[in-house]
Image: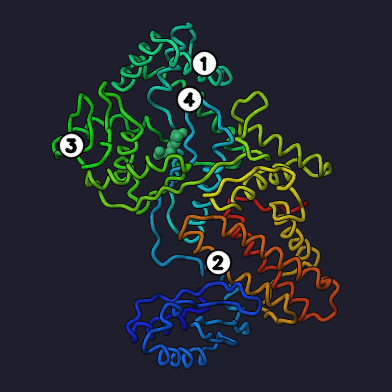
Amino acid sequence: MKIFEQVSIQLNKLFKDFGLDENVDIKISKLEDVDYQIDNLVKFAKHDQINHIMKEVNILLSKSKVIESYEITDNCFINLNLNLNRCDKFLSNIKNSLLTDRPKKIIIDYGGPNIGKPLHVGHLRSLNIGRSIKKINEVIGNDVVTDIHLGDWGMPVAQIITYCELNNIEIKSLTVERLLEIYPESSELYENSETFKKDAQKINKNLNNSNVEVLNKWSLIREISVEDLKSTLSKLSHDFDLWLGESSVNELIKPMIESLKTKGKINLDSGALVSAEETDPKILITKSDGSYLYLTTDLATILNRIENYDFDIALYVVDSRQKLHFEQLFKTAKYFDFPKRKYEHVDFGTINDKEGRPFKTRDGGTKKLLSLYNETFEYIKNINEQLDENIIHDLTNTVLTYSDLLTNRRTDYKFDLEKFTNISGKTGIYVQYAQVRAKNIIKASKYKSHNEKIKITSSAERNLIIGLLNLEIVIKQSLKFNEPHHLANYLYEICNLFNIFYEEENIINLKDEKIKKSKLLLTSYFLEVTNLVFISLGIKAVNKM
Ligand code: ARG
C-alpha cells in the first residue's frame, strides 16, 4: 500500500538484516478496532532473536508518521492503526496509486462459444470473470488483448455442412434460428446414423485440407453465427479485441507437427501422433485418421499468439471441467520447448437454478443467455415501472454481473432473481443505489472541489476513509489470484460504510461550511473509488434510480 511504502521498505530491510526471507504483507484487519495487520513474524515466534527483532520493529513503528498507534501481540502479530491526518494526499491520488511500475502484456481467452449454438447460461461466468479480469488489468495499466476463441472448426461444423448438403439447404439463405435448430439435429444424426457419420467425417477431412467448396460453406455458417453472437454480446455489454478461434490456426498445424517430428517430440503410435513425453496415458496430438483434437488447435494457438501478440501471460477463463485439458496443454507446450510464457487456467464452477439444479428451460433444453437477460429485465421492470428502459437495461446487466462475481469463482452458485434484486441485500441493486445517493448529494449541493481538506468528525467518516484507502490492497488481491469476488465484496462493504456515513447527518443542510465541504469531498472520493470498482467489475454505474 502506497501509504505504508516507507514503513514497508524499512521493515523489509530489518527482516533482511536478521536473515528473515520475508516480504512485508500488510493485510486489512478483521478485528474491530484494528485497521491493518502484519503477520510475517508469527512464524518466527520461536526464533532465537525474536525479542531483539521485536524491539527493532517497535522502534521503527514508533517513528512512523503514518501510524497512529500499534500493538505487537505475544504471538507476534503486528496490529496497526492509520494516522489519517495525511489521508488527503493518498485519497486524491488513489487512481494513480493503482498503476503498476512494470506493465505486462496479457492475453485473455474467454467466452469461447461454439458456432452454430447460441450463447447459453453456461457462458455467463466465463464472460463476467473474463471481462472483469480484463478491466482490472487495464485499471492498473497492463496491456490487455482479449480473444473470444470460437469453437469454429472440426466435426461440429462438418456435421452442420453435411446436414445442409443432405437436405439441399442453401447455407447462404439460412437464418440463425434455423441454424441453431440444425446443430442438435445434426449431432444426433451423427450419433445414430453410420452413413451420416461417414459423410461428416469426409467433410471434416476436406475442411482440414482447406477444400475451397467446404471452406466457403464453413465461412457462411461462421458469419451467420458470429453476427448472432455479437448481437447478444452487445446486449450484455461485452466486446472482444479478437474474434479468432480454432479455425484461425488450421494452416499452422501442419508445419507445427512437421517441426515437432523433426525435433523428436512426437511419435507415431498405431497411426496416431502422440507426444514423446513419458506420460500415462500418452498425450494424443492427432488421431489415427489424421484429424486434429482440441489440444492440437490450442497448441497451435499458443504459437500463433506468441508470433502475433507477443504476451507475458495468457489466461484461459474456462470452466473447471476442462482442468485436465489445460494441465495437458501447459505441460505439453513446455515439453515441446515453446517460448517460455506464463499460462494460467482461470477455472470456475457452475451456475445452477434457484433450487440448485442445472439451469434448463421448461422443456429441458439449455437456457439461452438472451432469455435470462429478458427475464431479469422484465423482473426489474415489474418492480420499478416508472424507471427508464435504458436504466432497467443497465440494472439488468448489473444484476447478471454482480451476483455472478460475488461468489468465489471456484464455487458453484444458485441463480436467484428475487435475492439478487433485493435493494437491501448484498446485490448489484444495493451498490448502484448507494452510488446514486452519493451522486445526488453532489448534484444537489453543486459541489466542486477546491483543494479543501478532510476533517474527520466521526467514526463513520474514519471507517469510510480507511475503506476507500483499502482499494489498493483489494485490487492487488483480485489480480494476484484472478479473483474478482474480492472486489465485488469490497464494493458492498464500502457502500455499506457510505450509507452509515450518509445516514449520520443530513449533509446538504449542514450549517458549518467547513464540515459540509469536508463531507462532500469525502463523498466525491467515495464516488471515485466506486467508479473504479464498477469499471473493474465490468458494470456501468447508473446516474438515476
Ligand atoms: N469452445 C470451447 C468449449 O466450448 C471453449 C474454448 C476455451 N478456450 C480455449 N482456448 N480452449 O468448451
Q: Is mark 4 within 8 Å of ligand 1?
A: no
Q: Label 4, on which residue? A: 223
Q: How much space separates mark 2 and mark 1, taking CA atoms?
A: 52 Å
Q: Label 2, on which residue? A: 95
Q: Viewed as shown, does residue 185 lie left or right of 358?
A: left
- Of 85 and 431, nearer the camera is 431
| Earlier sequence position, callout 2 versus callout 3 | 2
**Closer mark to the observer between disc 3 and disc 4:** 3
Q: Label 3, on which residue? A: 259
Q: Position of residue 455 (x, y in %)?
A: 71, 82
Q: Position of residue 294 (x, y in %)?
A: 36, 33
Q: Viewed as shown, does residue 143 lie left or right of 508?
A: left
Determine which of the numbered discs, if any, sits on residue 524 in the image: none
- Is residue 492 something that shows in the picture? yes
In the image, residue 488 sits, relative to residue 231, either above or below, namely below
Is label 4 in a helix, a strand or a loop? helix
Q: Position of residue 16 (x, y in %)?
A: 34, 82
